[in-house]
Image (spheres, rainbow, N blue to C red):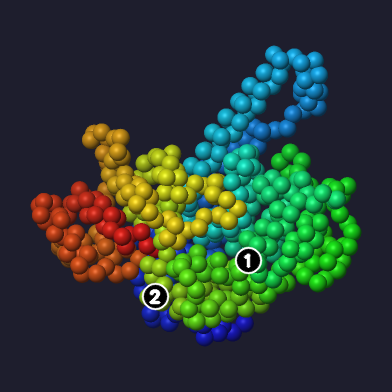
Amino acid sequence: MKLSKELKPLDATDFNSDCARHLLNRAGFGGTPEQVQALTDLGLVKAVNLLVEFEGRTYADKGAEEFDKDIMRPPTDQERQARIAARRSNDQAALDKFERERNRQQGEDREQIRDMQKWWLQRMIETPRPLEEKMTLFWHGHFANGYRTVEESWNMFQQNQLFRQFATGNFAHLVRKVIRDPAMIKYLDNDENRKGRANENLARELMELFTLGEGRGYTENDIKEGARALTGLSLRDNDSYFDASTHDDGSKTIFGYTGAFDGDGFVNLILARKECPEFICTKLYRFFVNDSPGEFSKTQKAFVAELSSLFVAKKGELKPVLKALFSSEHFHHPANRAAIIKSPIQLIVQSVRQFHSPIRSLSVLNSASDLMGQQLFQPPNVKGWDGGRGWINTSTLFTRQNLMVYLLTGRSPKSQEWEVNKDGFDATHLVAAAKKPDGSVSMEDGIAWLLRCSLATPPQTERVADVLTSLRSRNVPLDNHGVIEALCLITAIPEYQLC
């Protein structure tokens, strides 16, 4: 398919280190100056392919094999009969024992979801396949489920792996898997959706939030009939299954089409709607290109429209869509630089990856992310995180600044002086590219380079002057301590919150 003028690729001669940094920040979580230079040297086409065609690079997963799928296992027939007998005989001692065991399981499961949060955060920091994790995070916010409702960590892990499996795959295949996902079935009560007693939750959110958009291309009757089509998709322990005895196999009319539609038939009808590709490509645009509030400009609308046409032409395959997006002149346009507010996870992961700072403590980083408004495996509701300007307020900005000081120095509000930078973080590699032939780095060149590597756009001269003035007023040299102190200043400025 010949790309339209809206999807025109950036001229290869215009792909420089600023473009490579922008690409690495958006299609992943940033990188060190050395990694940015390596991407620059590849050129636009090879750089985009390296990020999108990630399957050839392996990642040694740590911890996933240790997760226990049986913490919240259902009771055996013997245990079930014993509990029934205890209730009938009013055996309070036995009932208390069952309750204590249930509480123990729930406590252990809550501990496991915390381990999963640390596992995923570390994976995002360490992975050589950043787009895979970025898209997994995208789908987690799009098909949003929360642990507090699902109440089973293994189901949340299964869903996370599903999003990773289809991270850049076929959207239609992903949607068909999602309606059978145990966490989704629990979260939206589809295990209670049966013939004669239809539960509309999954049908409604499938169209409203996952595929078409609120109020776009469907009616209340389509929801009711779609719910009937989804009957029978239920759960058995940690797996979904189709219960034919609860499925409504009668005739249904959806979007004006009549037939004995089941779940897949309903999904097929949805995916054929013109609103679907536009909705998904709009979400991708706001996630990867520009999340500024308000109506799209004429140029933005045209870009999304052509991206949607490509989505249709490629039958929902996401890789061609993402390649076109990341290669486009529009994506690299100055208006779309520093046009996205970093989510808490983006802030944490990008900072560690671009500065190559110590991780410090995954528990502390996850707690900070929660305070900043984003807790992994726990979106606030089925709509996911609002994102954009919703990430920033006086409370979260204060936490963001404290977090950066912690990452760079090890200093937290509760730490003692002797605990600061105990990991021996050497930040001087960040100014290596600014060295003169004799190996020295001038303050002006070093600070300008740090700002360029840290911010989403080339720094204004006033910012360079501000950081220089602060360091010089205290006679701070640009040694390791000086680089770290400069970074503490840089990460506190408003522009650092932008990606």
Q: Tell me what residue is drawn at x 50 percent, y 58 percent.
A: 386
Q: On screen, 42 above or below 186?
A: below
**Where's residue 82, x and y in %?**
78, 20
Q: Is residue 435 visible?
A: no
**Where's residue 96, x and y in %?**
67, 18
Farthest residue to the front: give it.
Answer: 220
Label 1 Cα crowd, 10 Å radius (few <14 / some 14-19 / many 20+): some
**Distance in Å between CA atoms under marks 1 and 2:** 26 Å
**Where's residue 476, x and y in %?**
13, 51
In the foreground, 300 or 23: 300
Element type at mark 2: helix
**Where's residue 479, x and y in %?**
18, 52
Return the residue at label 1.
213
Q: Amino acid at mark 1?
A: Gly
Return the residue at label 2.
335
Q: Tell me what residue is drawn at x 61 percent, y 49 percent.
A: 145
Q: Is residue 90 visible?
A: yes
Label 2 Cα crowd, 10 Å radius (few <14 / some 14-19 / many 20+): few
Q: On screen, 47 above or below 182?
A: below
Q: Which mark is residue 128?
A: none
Q: Tell me what residue is drawn at x 62 percent, y 82 percent.
A: 1
Quarter holding residue 97: top right
Q: Tell me what residue is drawn at x 20 percent, y 48 percent.
A: 481
Total numbered circles: 2
